[in-house]
Amino acid sequence: KSLVFDVVVIDEAAQALEVACWIPMLLGKKAILAGDHQQLSACVKSTEAQKKGLDRTLFGRMIEKHGDHVAALLSIQYRMNDIIMGWSSQSFYDSRLTAAESVASRTLDLQEVPESNLTGDILEMLSSPLLFVDTCSLPLYREDEQQAGADVKSSAAKAAYAAVHQSRWNKGESRFTV
């Protein structure tokens, strides 16, 4: 006996591969895709699969084809301090997000850390809800693969280095460094 649902809800649909969405969607009369295409995308490691379009999400394809009017923005967020939310709102959402009052002024509670160790700039940095750390000058996080493993000499060692360090950076990621 076949199952048929009135509604199929696919959460985190902006990360769910399109091919993974079709199976549950075929079991429903209606589908709701919940997700945010401005956040993390689908993760497909195979470059061959990417070349064939298997890294696409149904959510992303709908936005590309029909534009933002097929999606509804949930403009009040309940997870972040107002300063953190303000940065992402301005950077990705045309300043359309607002923080809920219950989280707007929430910050890290530093009671576990002895105050004598935290002074001046360090205390100010740790008290700030939003802190950018520049990692561009660290060889381990460079996008230039030759620079990242420059001290590795043999081809076997380079292959081992690449296998261990392959996921430590993402192309284009450092362009966001402030």
Image (spheres, rainbow, N blue to C red):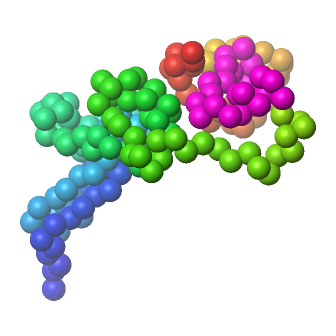
Locate residue 162, reporting x and y percent.
69, 30
Q: Nearer the viewer, residue 8 or 77?
A: 77
Q: Nearer the viewer, residue 42 or 71?
A: 71
- Left or right: 14 in relation to 158: left
- Asked whether 122 falls inside the magenta stretch, the response is yes
Q: Nearer the viewer, residue 162 or 142?
A: 142
**Residue in the image at 13% along x and 35% along y:** 69
Q: Quadrant of residue 142?
A: top right
Assign the N terminus to one quadrant of the image: bottom left
Locate residue 168, reporting x and y percent.
65, 33
Question: Quick check: can you spot residue 9?
Answer: yes
Q: Considering only vertical position in the picture, is 130 above or below 43?
A: above
- Asked whether 27 falls inside the magenta stretch, the response is no
Boundaries of the magenta span: 119-140
Question: Quick check: can you spot residue 92?
Answer: no
**Residue in the image at 40% along x and 23% along y:** 91
Locate residue 78, reporting x and y percent.
41, 49
- Left or right: 55 in relation to 140: left
